[in-house]
Amino acid sequence: MDFAEIVDTSSSRIFNIKVEGQTVAGNVDIFTLAGGHDKGYEFVFNAEVTDGQMDIEFVAVNGQPMVSEIELNYLRP
């Protein structure tokens, strides 16, 4: 997942990321992680899908979550 914060202030958008019902990243502040606004940050997660559908949830802590890109790759067992 790729993110970029377009707001020029830290802590204006903080959220949790859940994949397949499990929190994979908590209290995410892209501004702080990327080192400022208009800079990108990437997370890579592995998850096992058992029902044929990848479930991804962004849970707001402060402000509204925003994602720039989601890339899914199927890995054969």
Image (cartoon, rainbow, N blue to C red):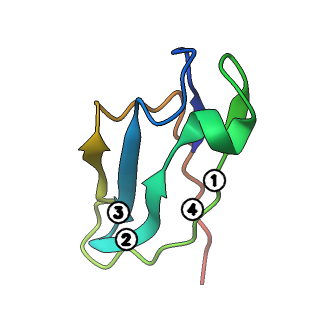
Q: What distance separates the C-alpha of mark 2 from that of mark 1?
A: 13 Å
Residue to which mark 4 is pinned? 74
Write down the quadrant of residue 14 in the picture: top left
- Which amino acid type corresponds to the residue marked 3 in the rendered image? Lys
Q: Residues within 10 Å of mark 3 (few under 14, many from 20)?
A: some
Percent from the top left, x then y, of residue 63?
29, 31
Mark 2 and 3 residues: CB-CB less than 8 Å, in contact? yes
Density class for disc 1 (Cα within 10 Å; few <14, some 14-19, many ≥20) is few
Pick whichever of labels 2 and 4 is earlier in the sequence: 2
Q: Which of marks 4 and 3 is nearer the N terminus?
A: 3
Q: Judge depth for marks 1 and 4 and give the one in front.
A: 1
**Cα gap from disc 2 to disc 3, whole angstroms:** 4 Å
Task: Identify the residue under disc 3.
Answer: 18
Residues packed near mark 4 inside 10 Å, few (<14), some (14 to 19) or many (20 plus): few
Up-down relation of residue 17 to residue 29 (above or below): below
**SS assignment at label 1:** loop
Residue placed under numbered mark 2 in the picture: 23
- Foreground mark, 2 or 4, reads 2
Query: For numbered disc 2, what is the local secondary structure?
Result: strand
Q: Nearer the viewer, residue 21 or 30?
A: 30
From the viewer's perspective, is residue 53 above or below residue 51? Answer: above
**Residue 43: which disc?**
1
